[in-house]
Image: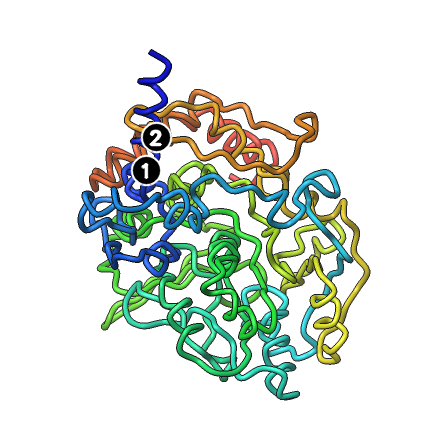
Amino acid sequence: MSNWKDKFENMLNNSLSVKIIGDNDLCISCGACLHICPFNNIQMWFNDYRGKWESQVKNSDACRKCNGKSLCLSVCPSYNVDYVELARSNENSLLGRIRCVCNGYSRNKDIRFSASTGGFVRELCKTLLDNKKIDGAISITHDHGLEYSPKILTDIHLMPNSIYHNINFQNTITLLKKAEGKYLLIGLPCQITSIELFLRKRKYAHLKEKIYAKVSLICGYSFDRKNARAFAHYNNFDLEEISYREKGRYKKTSLKNKSSGLLFEVFNPKNFRERINNMIFFDQFLPQLGCLYCVDHICYCADIVVGDAWQKRYSDDDIGTNIIICRTEKGEDLISQMESFKFEKGYQEEIIESQSPAYALGTIGEGMKRVRLKGHYFIPERRRTDNLSDIQIYRFKFKDLIKIKVIKNMLRSERFDMARRLYLLLNFKGFLKSFLRKIIKGSV
């Protein structure tokens, strides 16, 4: 019997492919699998129901010719990633390897104000381009509508602010294959991880020479397009374009079409209606499913990691300040070149203060491994340490699971009004407390 089980297991392993990732709604659209497939059997396609780009196996029979665990799945950041072996994730109580932590902002007021936060990435690109250290930056830029894609940029003004909805990142590896020179690679943690896994393949190891350094943005979660569509529906707006972070630190969400535009406060909504719409859009339990399983929001594989400095000491800052995690010697060299950026000493403890355990320590992702969602038979296993006492786990509440299992499906089915009613019901107690506090303070 055991011999039969072994044969069955071997047969299953030999036919495994990224299809298991797509089937379980875990694809984050990095596109690395497409480039590694020896049979050209994988493509990116837009899943209209899910509102996101996904990898798709063209012919499942072709997958029996190779072992996906050695090829397509081995470069997939949504499969089983060993971050200890990949990037020493076990160091500093799961914050990963750290050379230094600092905070700061661009000395150029226009760059600081117009950037997503303190302007570090744009200042770094400008410094390296001016000093002729790089031939360009590989960064996403706007194509049309909701579409963004990676390109080689030499003009920092073409860099968008933070984009919170799903994009197709597959063009990055194409650029690395075709371009000559050295480039600053900018991406989200999962995107940087996919590139790192891809370049570990002997056939493509030479492409490492084209990457001058890897810079990652601290990522909370990335949402699919249905969240944006719901937000537009609630505001009775025909959505064509969206941008998320405009005009200072406490950013605004901007909806646009050919004839008009709407601008909404994210942190300080004007009324209850705006507040509930913002909450549904950006709820941490309503992103892409693959993002909920993430334990690497602060990118173990990057040279430098950049995000918002949400520490208490910057609570009066209304323009924007960065927190910067320098992970490698290359990262230290980069920040030493930046005379146009004002640096202040930071501390490892501030990474958690700034980003919360959910992002800094991946507590929600660890908790998701214990949540069995109906219809999902594959659970990613990410090894970050051999010491399980280091791992903090988020304990899901009933209303959290309702959001993940029910409200998310309502949004994808475009039952937007029903989703809002249920969301209001789940959060009624919190809204009531907030309303009563305002009455007591005399603001209502």
Q: Which residue type carries mark 1?
A: Asn
Residue 249 lies left or right of residue 240; in this view the side is right
Residue holding disc 2: 10
Q: Is residue 151 above or below residue 215?
A: below
- Would residue 273 be visible to someone looking at this image? no
Q: Which residue type carries mark 2?
A: Asn
- Which residue is at the front of the view, 116 or 305? 305
What is the x, y in percent for residue 29? 36, 54
What is the x, y in percent for residue 59? 18, 48
Q: Residue at x 43, y 69 (%)?
A: 140
Q: Residue at x 58, y 52 (%)?
A: 299
The quadrant in which residue 283 appears is top left
The quadrant in which residue 292 appears is top left
Residue 113 lies left or right of residue 199; in this view the side is right
Residue 66 lies left or right of residue 387; in this view the side is left
Image quarter hosting the N terminus: top left
Q: Residue at x 36, y 32 (%)?
A: 423
Q: Secondary structure at mark 1?
A: helix
Residue holding disc 1: 14
What is the x, y in percent for residue 61? 18, 43
Q: Which mark is residue 203?
A: none
Q: Are marks 1 and 2 in contact (CB under 8 Å)?
A: yes
Q: Secondary structure at mark 2?
A: helix
Q: Residue at x 63, y 81 (%)?
A: 128
The quadrant in which residue 258 appears is bottom left
- Which residue is at the front of the view, 101 or 87? 87
What is the x, y in percent for residue 196? 53, 57
Residue 28 lies left or right of residue 437; in this view the side is left
Q: Is residue 414 above or below residue 305?
A: above
